[in-house]
Amino acid sequence: MKMLLHFNPQIIKKPLIAEVVLETGVLVNINKATIDTAGGKLIINVPDKDAKKVIKSFKSRGVDVVTLEKPIIMIDEECVHCGACISVCPTNVFKYEADGSVSVDYKECIQCGACITACPHNALKLSE
Amino acid sequence: MVEKTVQEINQKIRDGSVHVVTAEEMTEIVETLGPKGAAKEVDVVTTGTFGAMCSSGAILNFGHADPPIKMQKVWLNDVEAYAGLAAVDAYIGATQLSESRGMEYGGGHVIEDLVAGKSVELRAIAYGTDCYPRRNIETSLTLSDVNQAVMINPRNAYQRYNVATNSSDRILHTYMGPLLPNLGNAIYSGSGALSPLFNDPTYATIGIGTRIFLCGAHGYIIGEGTQHDPTHNLGTLMVQGNLKEMSTDFVRGASLYKYGTTLYVGLSIPIPILNENIAKRTGIKDADISTNVLDYSVPRRSRPTLARVTYEELKSGGIVIGKKEIRTSSLSSLHKAREVAETLRERIKKGEFYLSEPVGKISTKTVFKPMRQTGGLPLVKDVMTDGIGTIKPDVSIEEAAKRIIKGGFNHLPVVSDDGRLVGIVTAWDISKAVAMKKRGKVEQIMTRKVIVVSPSDPIDIAARKLEQYNISALPVVDAKRKVIGIITSEDLSKLLAGGT
């Protein structure tokens, strides 16, 4: 399961990921990390069965956790199913169905944003 | 021998007995029944395409203001429309960008907004005359407020299109979308076996005056399209249709990142199956349609062709170039192209759309010429410094420093024994080595990945590379990568100043 972590600037210096990994024994995969004066933002991926204890562990350290059911949002009214998103995606989130429409495999998305700029119709956005 | 006329088919549409299928359905029918059987069975084949067609736009007549104005320049939602005709006529082109929003909004979006029934801001200026005294106007209007609103597209329905890929080491943002480095992806356009012009490549039934489906409206072919190139299976059509009858289901503005805006146009041409030859040609399959894969990293008119592939391969999701498997995806929408073909099929079945006989032929011989360029374009070889010093990779850093001082230049190409470029060292590299008390050979401090130009490249290419890579000089190499000179940003600035 993917989750979005928000760190406030007060706790940004602490090795929180390492602490959570040691405490829970769950291997946390970091998909994306950004840090600026407003704090840190991380997207991580953990096995579904371990999600609960990882969330608990982060929350106990003051980290705000949002689970990402749909890391990427396809806006149906805008999408014309061209498929411009397909070949630029590093994790094969998009594919053509037999009827030519484009489908989304949400669990593979790492929120890199490559599809956002590739989409000529402004039909994709990252969920926050 | 089956022989039918357009009038007979229209009679069948009238009495409800017409048999209409899409071009994809027809492929299977021809395969099963053969051309003769298919011609007996089927009366009309509907084709379809839905893709980015940059050469599109619309003529609008706004009606006269009071006091009247002869618009000299006009903007719709801050996108300039061409107003160099009469007083209140203007042509809004799909690729014109918004003056305030840049590439995210353009003429294509204005057209979509008008079709959607949205209100659009009009702003115009004029010089004022005795008969048209007004000098500016600002108003908002919708599609129902304007008199005529006619989409007139100089070039639509490309028979097929080249596939774009990129062999360079950086991402390219093109009108085909983002091309990933090192042949990271390949992007194609066109609907293959559904393509209108591939279903009648001899223009036996498609001509001037053919009634078509254009963005939901019933439009017409008005002639061959610009850049029509029928002998290379790159035919195009010029078309028109009433904007007021269109639907946003079949027309969409679009922006291509770091390229600009365009218009996605849905277009279908009905092919009357008048005889078995026509039926045979509508049996075309994706596997029968080949197109070229071009390397867009070469910024010249003729880009190198890396492979020839079929639409069947393109639609499979991957093509192979050399030993590399490259992921493909489309810029045009097959899903929508099918919807377009199916919508026209249903309209014909219901008797809402009748076929027309063309009143004139579309040429099958037109040649697409390149631009005649007078005022010679300076080439790299005209501007570069030749007879420059080079150095071998195993020479000491100290020796390189001496040569740079002696030669009075900042860049020293590093060449192998047979004169091929293997790296470059600059005065900066040497200063850095000295500052860090590094001793040793040139090969330890040289830059190995050298950006180069060819002597026959126009200087614009050299200038773009210098800017893109933020460097100050480019070694000039021949086809065997032998160094024959160097071109620096100073050479180019001298040229601009008229120094050379």
Image (cartoon, rainbow, N blue to C red):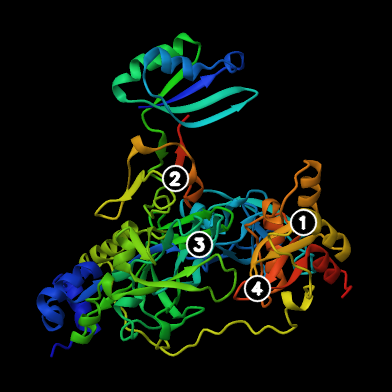
For label 3, the SS is loop
Q: Which amino acid does label 2 sit on?
A: Ala
- Please state if B83 lies on the left or on the right of B338 as rendered: right
Tell me, for residue B99, which label it has, or none: none
For label 4, the SS is loop
Q: Please rate how many residues cluster around mark 4, counting C-alpha atoms within 10 Å: few if below 14, some from 14 to 19, many from 20.
A: some
The quadrant of the image that shows the N terminus of chain B is bottom left
Instruction: Name the residue beneath numbered marker 1.
Output: B426
Instruction: Name the residue beneath numbered marker 2.
Output: A123
Q: Mark 1 against mark 2, which lies toward the viewer?
A: 1
- Please state if B257 lies on the left or on the right of B391 as rendered: left
Q: What residue type is labelled 1?
A: Thr
Instruction: Name the residue beneath numbered marker 4.
Output: B482
Location of residue B413 with respect to A17 vertically, above or below: below
Tell me, for residue B166, which label it has, or none: 3
Query: Could you tell me if residue B145 is visible in this image?
Result: no
For label 1, the SS is strand
The quadrant of the image that shows the C terminus of chain B is bottom right
Task: Determine which quarter of the picture holds residue B173.
Answer: bottom right
Labels 4 and 1 within one chain: yes
Q: Mark 1 lies on which chain?
A: B
Q: Mark 3 lies on which chain?
A: B
